[in-house]
Amino acid sequence: MLEPKKTPPISIGDIDLDVLEDTLSFYIRTVNLAVSRDLDERLEGCDVARGTGKITTLLMVDSHPGIRPSVIAQLILKDRSAMGRLVDQMENHGLLTRETSVDDNRAQELYITEKGAQLAVQVRALVTQQSKDFFAFIPEDEQRLLMDILRRAYRRIAGLP
Amino acid sequence: MLEPKKTPPISIGDIDLDVLEDTLSFYIRTVNLAVSRDLDERLEGCDVARGTGKITTLLMVDSHPGIRPSVIAQLILKDRSAMGRLVDQMENHGLLTRETSVDDNRAQELYITEKGAQLAVQVRALVTQQSKDFFAFIPEDEQRLLMDILRRAYRRIAGLP
DNA sequence: AAAAAATAGTTGCAATTGTCCACTATCTAG
DNA sequence: CTAGATAGTGGACAATTGCAACTATTTTTT
């Protein structure tokens, strides 16, 4: 029978990724997407969900009382205006307070609140666990390797010693 | 002299990253930020700048004529609506065309245009070079390792075989 | 063969985000 | 004392993205 045969569509299994197959940045970008989404889900409603930086800010303010917005901005790769808004938000949520530095009236010092400190405890646990879970399918030793490399990359990017 | 001494502010060198120091997801997120920005700079005005997915879409349509939007959506981890807009954009820019599949009238097939094909050539070179440059400070063998691990992660996430 | 469920794509809405730029205040250096 | 750098603020704007509802078509079930 010479019936018109349906050409099977290109399905997900047939795909090769072209040059992206060997492009590190492609994998970084996509894995980031997935891990960030997963993290957001777990933070549902947690006052520090969505976007990069809230978590880092919370933890940094908690463990470095008096730290300045501009320093955190450098850590999370944001400009000062974005950082300012982030601090606004967290202040409104009662997680931290701003004070003008007595040493330099241009600068601010950030301090954690009681509520912020409590949240920090939870977030520390949650973030650690999430990362562990998400990458659980990678063997321990490879995880360490991966982390070592990415840590170096990050420190270089952020200008850390 | 007992003058009031200025307390030196917490500076970038004094920071320790708390639990983030050992959190893979933190590094993925920050390195992603940096590498994506760098990429965007190089793509300035290039019709496929900003956001994830345009590049992948271009290359996939170029190397898999007739591929469907939903298949690409799965590769770039987006939902159908986001994918639709992406295709709108690229169609408006004259990079690809849509046709309704004769086999399945619900589905579309995407085809590259001349302009799109030319851009694909450039983008292939640019993306490859960018990734190479950006991670140049990592030794070759570590890069390979990193890529192997992340590739596995990606394939798992995207549901590839 | 008819009804139900699954799939592909579109659209509206809203929220988020990030960026750019200009502006003020303050500090530091020459 | 002036010039230039630095910290933070605020506005406007563009772009992405995500959700949910909706249509059309195909496939499965009964």
Image (cartoon, coloured by chain):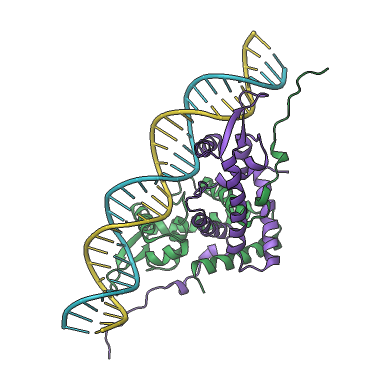
Chain colours: A purple, B green, C cyan, D yellow
Q: Is residue B61 above or below residue D7?
A: below
Viewer-nearest residue: A92 or B99:
A92
Q: Which corner quadrant of the image does residue B7 belong to?
A: top right
Q: Nearer the viewer, residue A136 or A114?
A: A114
Give the side of residue A144 with respect to residue A9, left or right: right
Could you tell me residue A43's position as x and y percent? Answer: 51, 53
- Is any atom of residue A111 visible in this view? yes
Q: Is residue B28 left or right of residue A15?
A: right
> Furthest-right residue in view?
B1
Give the position of the N terminus of chain B as an image quadrant.
Answer: top right
* Residue B110 figure quarter: bottom left
State how many labels appear.
Answer: 0
Rendering coords of residue B21 (x, y %):
68, 51
Q: Quadrant of residue C15?
A: top left
Q: Residue at x 56, y 49 (%)?
A: B33
Tell me: residue B47, above or below residue A108.
below
The answer to whether residue A77 is seen in the rendering is: no
Left or right of B137 in this view: B157:
left
Between A63 and A138, the residue placed more toward the observer is A63
**Vertical position of residue B42 compared to residue A99: above or below:** below
Residue ID at (59%, 63%): A133
The x, y position of residue B114, in whole percent, is 39, 59
Residue visible at 58% across and 59% down in the picture = A130
Q: Position of residue B157 (x, y in %)?
A: 52, 66
Q: Foreground residue, B65 or C22?
A: C22
